[in-house]
Image (spheres, grey):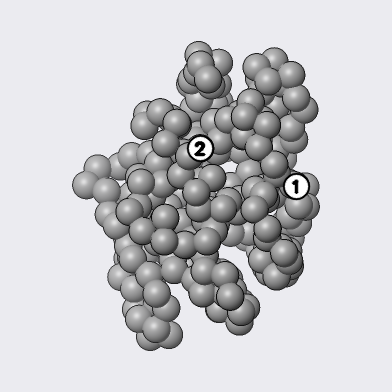
């Protein structure tokens, strides 16, 4: 039986907690031992309290670490990558707290022969529609120019690594990285590491409440654009 450590950052995700609970329950049915490690990015709602109650009630193996200041999703993921016990597990699974994809897709991946290659999801639908697709295409172009390899959905958060491979990749990612998954993609390509892609389908019946960018239509897109430009600059300047 494989044992997998699941790394999940979150910030004020109370409205998305029910769906994550359902995902954890579905994963627990597999013949896999899971440990869930969450990073609370200095939330000011009751996500951590409610999550703790659920995990304790059903006796899941878990830990919640809390940032003293808001580090952002990338900073929280970097902190999780430094978790001491990762080396004791066979595989590392990274996902977003607001998991809005079909549970059956992830269950199917985890039920397959994981072997020793990296598995990276490939999303077929993006929130923010065409706007987000344009941002994604820009990141794909940057990765192509730096690696001379085509890679769709460079920032997909759904990834499974052999633990030793994960540790080797993520120790090379700068601590101030805004979007570490894109750095991970680049390192994987430049290192010619073995990986396979698996389609991840969005659950179209699910409405995810994302708090990272706020509620305003235009202000939300301006924030995403500004964040994306800063992150693109980081990956362009990164030398590997």
When the figure is inspected, residue 70 is found, relative to residue 162, above or below; the finding is above
Residue 153 in the image: above or below residue 41: above
Name which residue lies at 66% across and 37% down.
193
* Label 1 with label 2: CB-CB less than 8 Å: no
Q: Quadrant of residue 194?
A: top right
Q: From the viewer's side, name the closer residue of 190 and 155.
A: 190
Q: Disc 1 to disc 2, how far (Cα)?
A: 18 Å
Q: Secondary structure at mark 2?
A: helix
Which residue is at the front of the view, 208 or 90? 90
**Foreground of the two, 43 or 52:** 52
Side (left or right) of 186 relative to 36: right
Q: Mark number for residue 169?
A: 2
Residue in front for this viewpoint, 80 or 118: 118
Q: Is residue 182 visible?
A: no
Regarding mark 1 in the picture, which secondary structure is present there? strand
Determine which of the numbered discs, if any, sits on residue 197 in the image. 1
* Residue at screen point 58% across, 30% down: 187
Residue 126, picture quadrant: top right
Say few, some or many: other residues with alpha carbon within 10 Å of mark 2 (under 14 / 14 to 19 / 20 or more). Answer: some
For this orientation, the residue located farthest to the left is 68
Q: Identify the disc placed on residue 19.
A: none
């Amino acid at each position: 039986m494989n044992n997998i450590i699941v790394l999940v950052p979150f910030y004020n995700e109370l409205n998305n907690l029910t769906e994550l609970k359902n995902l954890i329950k579905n994963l627990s049915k597999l013949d896999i031992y899971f440990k869930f490690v969450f990073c609370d990015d200095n939330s000011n709602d009751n996500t951590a309290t409610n999550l703790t109650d659920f995990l304790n009630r059903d006796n899941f193996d878990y830990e919640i670490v809390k940032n003293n200041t808001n580090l952002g999703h990338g900073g929280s993921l970097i902190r999780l990558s430094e978790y001491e016990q990762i080396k004791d597990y066979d595989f590392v699974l990274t996902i977003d707290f607001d998991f809005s994809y079909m549970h059956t897709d992830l269950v199917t991946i985890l039920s397959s022969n994981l072997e020793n290659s990296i598995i990276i999801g490939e999303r077929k639908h993006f929130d923010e529609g065409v706007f987000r697709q344009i941002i994604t295409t820009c990141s794909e172009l940057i990765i192509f120019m730096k690696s001379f390899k085509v890679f769709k959905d460079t920032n997909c958060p759904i990834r499974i690594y052999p633990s030793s491979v994960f540790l080797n990749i993520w120790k090379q990612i700068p601590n101030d990285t805004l979007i570490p998954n894109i750095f991970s993609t680049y390192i994987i390509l430049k290192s010619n590491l073995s990986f396979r892609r698996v389609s991840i389908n969005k659950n179209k019946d699910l409405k995810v409440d994302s708090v990272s960018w706020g509620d305003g239509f235009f202000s939300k897109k301006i924030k995403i654009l500004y964040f994306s430009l800063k992150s693109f600059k980081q990956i362009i300047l990164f030398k590997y």
